[in-house]
Image: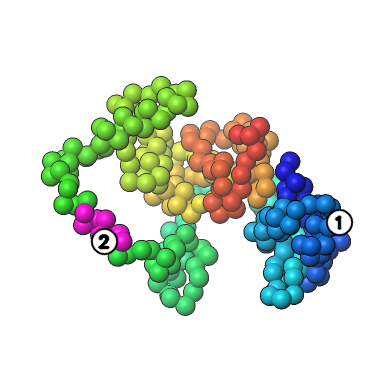
Amino acid sequence: MKLYQRLADDLSTLIRDGTLRPGERIPSVREISRERTLSTATVVHAYELLEAQGLIETRPRSGFYVSGQWRAPAPSPVAGGEPGARRRIAARSTRVDVSELVFEVLESVRDRHLVPFGSAFPSPLLFPMRRLARCLSHASRRMDQWGTLDDLPPGSIELRRQIARRYVRSGVHVSPDEIIITSGALEALNLSLQILTRPGDIVAVESPAFYGCLQAVEALRLRAVEIPSDPRQGVDVAAFARVLRRHPVRACWLMTTFQNPLGALVPEDNK
């Protein structure tokens, strides 16, 4: 571990265990540099890391303080109960009816006075519209007119060749003819569900689940069975095994990397 990381870890531990509390001043760069016999650059790097993690904040002409926004993490919620409660597995599958609620949440995106935490639409002000317009204009002038036909499904052959070459770097050999270009991940996932299921079939989904997943299950007239998902560990593997023993699951819709909406990253062993 590098010196700045060790220092950041030490201070992080003091903050997280309550030794240093929100609002309290932490030693200055010069003080830490002198006490630990570290360069000022090393200490500054450590403080920048802690600031990026939201643990400390800078106050002009005053120094560094434990962030007033930082709080110890709350207990992890579990599906079907209060924090700390025993996880429950659904005894039966259920029909999904969420579209009206989803549309209501997405409608809030139109309100410019709200920050829509219920959706993933960034502010239009963040997009470099003028630069995008110039790039699109430049690309359209050079575009091969026949490309509008050549790139119809399953997609551009050149792009599929490049994807196949990328797979080879991961040790996977896939023919370009086996690759289909879709308009985003949701289209690919919907197509996969259509291939694997028929109306009335059961799909295993995480709880809480991505709303796009629930809409797809509803649109295809499928039934869902829930698997508890933890904000830190991701989907409960033991509960998943029990679900598979109990229900004739035809498909599983899981996000093992930065799950939406929890942001969970499933450990490698669980994957």
Q: Residue at x 36, y 32 (%)?
A: 163
Q: How many marks?
A: 2
Residue 260 falls within the magenta-colored stretch: no
Toward the viewer: 6 or 140?
6
Note whether 136 is above or below 155 in the view shown: below
26 vs 101, left or right, is right
From the image, tell me which residue sits under label 2.
133
Percent position of residue 70, x then y = 72, 65
Toward the viewer: 238 or 186?
186
Magenta stretch secondary structure, dominant = helix
Note whether 60 is above or below 223 in the view shown: below
From the image, tell me which residue sits under label 1.
35
Identity of the residue furthest to the left in this view: 145
Q: Residue at x 74, y 70 (%)?
A: 63
Percent position of residue 145, x then y = 13, 44
Label 2 CA crowd tier, 10 Å (few <14, some 14–19, many 20+): few
| Magenta stretch bounds | 131-138
The first of marks 1 and 2 along the sequence is 1
